[in-house]
Amino acid sequence: MQNLENNRIPEKVKSIHIIAICGTGMGALAGMLKEAGFKVTGSDHHVYPPMSTFLAERGIEVTSGFRPENLYHRPDLVVVGNAVSKDNPEVEAMFGMGLPFCSFPQAMNRFFVNEKVALPIIGTHGKTSTSALLAWVLSIAGLDPSFMIGGILKNFDRNYNIGSGSYFVVEGDEYDTAFFDKGPKFLHYTPSRAILTSVEFDHADIYRDLDHVKQAFIDFVTAMPEEALLVACDETSTVRELAARAPCWVATYGFEERSPWRLESIRFDPPWTYFEVTIRGEPFGTFRTPLMGRHNALNALAVIAVADDLRIPKDIISRALETFEGIKRRQEVRGIKRGITVIDDFAHHPTEVRETLAAARGFYANNRLVAVFEPRTNSSMRKVFQKVYPKSFDDADLVCIRKPPLLDKIPADERFSSEELTRDLKDRGKKARYFPDTEAIIDYLVTVARADDVILIMSNGGFDNIHERLLKRL
């Protein structure tokens, strides 16, 4: 029987070992701990670039594979990643040796967030972009924020920072915390201001249905301190319902007249998105951003609302929005060859696919838009969204659907069918093709792509490095 009594962080810690160190969040935590002066070691099942390089450059010793001997140096603390199971060899050794251990958010709170004013961004969609934009606004304002975000900010060329300022921007993840804590990570943070972007069903591997997802967000919202501020998007009745349950100050944002923060108009004039903002019916300002799409204008509006509450002047907010370079893998142009533009995006949920394609259509109104989609998440590989995905591709002119690469992880009766999606797209009048692997997609695109095409590649994974391989073949 495993004893959870040592799920604690000792008063004095000098050395820390991280199990599953190569994830985006865990790797960033390792970097932060190293910069803070701790001796950091780690291990993971797959150790390869870019994370292996990132850790090596910071002098962090990483072992490939999970083995008991990785803990024989008896670190003062073990941080256990949420992808790690209780029968992991290092977890079993950790229990056997009686070593203190904690989860990712426990470590974040103890060593970094609790000393700051926490600004978590939560929601099914838009967390990364909104968090990154808020961090950049604070930075331009000279507030030197700390942040931990699930994507690489191009302005900083990293996804974390230990700043000297008072604020800590944290992307609040609704995914479970660890095998010994099945609650969402974001429940570990106590917010001063928080942004709630959206609530939809996702993460079908840990949530049963939308009500189960909603309960996680209800737990966050209802626990907010009375003096805090919740900035909530008015786009859906679900978010409005949750916001109404908050015991704190609430400011909604969006297109609705009832919202104090409102988008009056959006105009696309590449390379800019222009939008007008009102506050309680009065003009607040006209802004522009290089980010594409209606959804990014909403994300920017949420950041404007928080920045205004922090007394950041409008001219600084405007300058930050204009100079924000975006996030790697979010609408990132990876290259242009023979007049063909290849864009990489993290979209995987049906709503994200729809909004990303709509954004690209707005910016590339006169180009043929080719959508390439790899269903790879635990939700998209399941049939829960099988009948929802077809409508998500309406703005594409040509659609290429790959067979899910890890389908054997999903029970046979729950599996998503790329062939069925392709048929449904054709029934909607779309030109669509199914492909068994990445190589077949590249071979096809090299044959059919022509000058002025925009190829938008969507996956939450590496997609077999399709972007660079395609550009090389083009």
Image (spheres, helix red, strand yellow):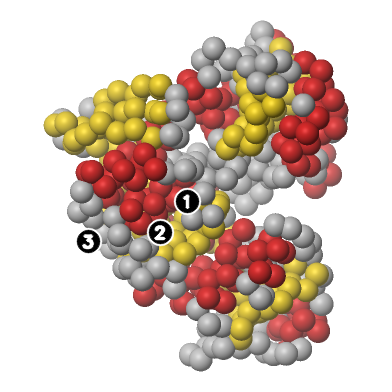
Residue at 80% across / 47% down in the picture? 409
Q: Quadrant of the N terminus?
A: bottom right
Left or right: 307, with 100 as reference point: left
Left or right: 159, with 418 as reference point: left
Instruction: Tell me residue 157's x, y (percent).
Output: 54, 55
Q: Label 3: how many residues lie within 10 Å, few (<14), some (14-19) or many (20+)?
A: few
Instruction: Tell me residue 12's x, y (percent).
Output: 51, 91
Asked if labels 1 and 3 touch by Cβ distance under 8 angstroms, the answer is no
- Dividing the picture into quadrants, the one containing residue 288 is top left
- Check disc 1 and report the residue beneath it: 155
Q: Which mark is residue 169?
A: 2
Left or right: 72, with 198 as reference point: right
Q: Secondary structure at mark 3?
A: loop
* Mark nearer the N terminus (3 vs 1): 1
* Mark nearer the N terminus (2 vs 3): 2
Front tag of 1 and 2: 1
